[in-house]
Amino acid sequence: MPYVWWHSGYDFLCHAFRVEQVGGGRGFFEAACEHSVPVERVEREQRGHLCVSCLIRVGDALPDDGGGWRG
């Protein structure tokens, strides 16, 4: 599942948001870590520290391609 990394004006971290949330008239975005941010508080750019919980959840969802780096 593709993600975009955007800055949250609530906790000042960069969170992973599912791409399918980008379009449409949403009132808020929900990050991979379940952090919710109203549309007006999301900066659509990757800056600041990355959310560790988002990193873990996005990384855990990556398919194992048999390359051996995950285990």
Image (spheres, rainbow, N blue to C red):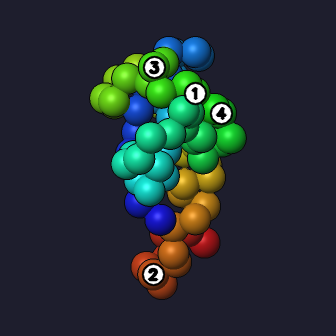
Image quadrant containing the C terminus: bottom right
Q: What numbered label is drawn on residue 35?
A: 4
Q: CA distance from mark 4 to mark 1?
A: 7 Å
The amino acid beneath tag 3 is Glu
Work out how far the residue at label 1 is from the one at label 2, CA to CA, in angstroms.
33 Å
> Where residue 12 sits in the image (x, y, percent)?
51, 15
**Marks 2 and 4, how far apart at CA:** 29 Å
The earlier-in-sequence mark between 4 and 3 is: 4
Question: Does the CB distance between marks 4 and 1 fall below 8 Å?
Answer: yes
Sequence-first disc among 2 and 3: 3
Q: Which mark is residue 37?
A: 1
* SS under mark 1: strand
Q: Kindly tell me whether residue 46 is visible in this rendering.
A: yes
In the image, residue 9 lies at what x, y percent?
A: 50, 15
Q: Earlier in the sequence, mark 2 or mark 4?
A: 4
Q: Residues within 10 Å of mark 3 (few under 14, many from 20)?
A: few
Q: Amino acid at mark 1?
A: Val
Pointer 2 local density, CA inside 10 Å: few below 14, some 14–19, many at least 20: few
Location of residue 12 with respect to 32 vertically, above or below: above
Spatial CA distance of label 2 from label 3 is 38 Å
The tag on residue 40 is 3
Amino acid identity at mark 2: Asp
Residue positioned 68% across, 41% down in the render: 34
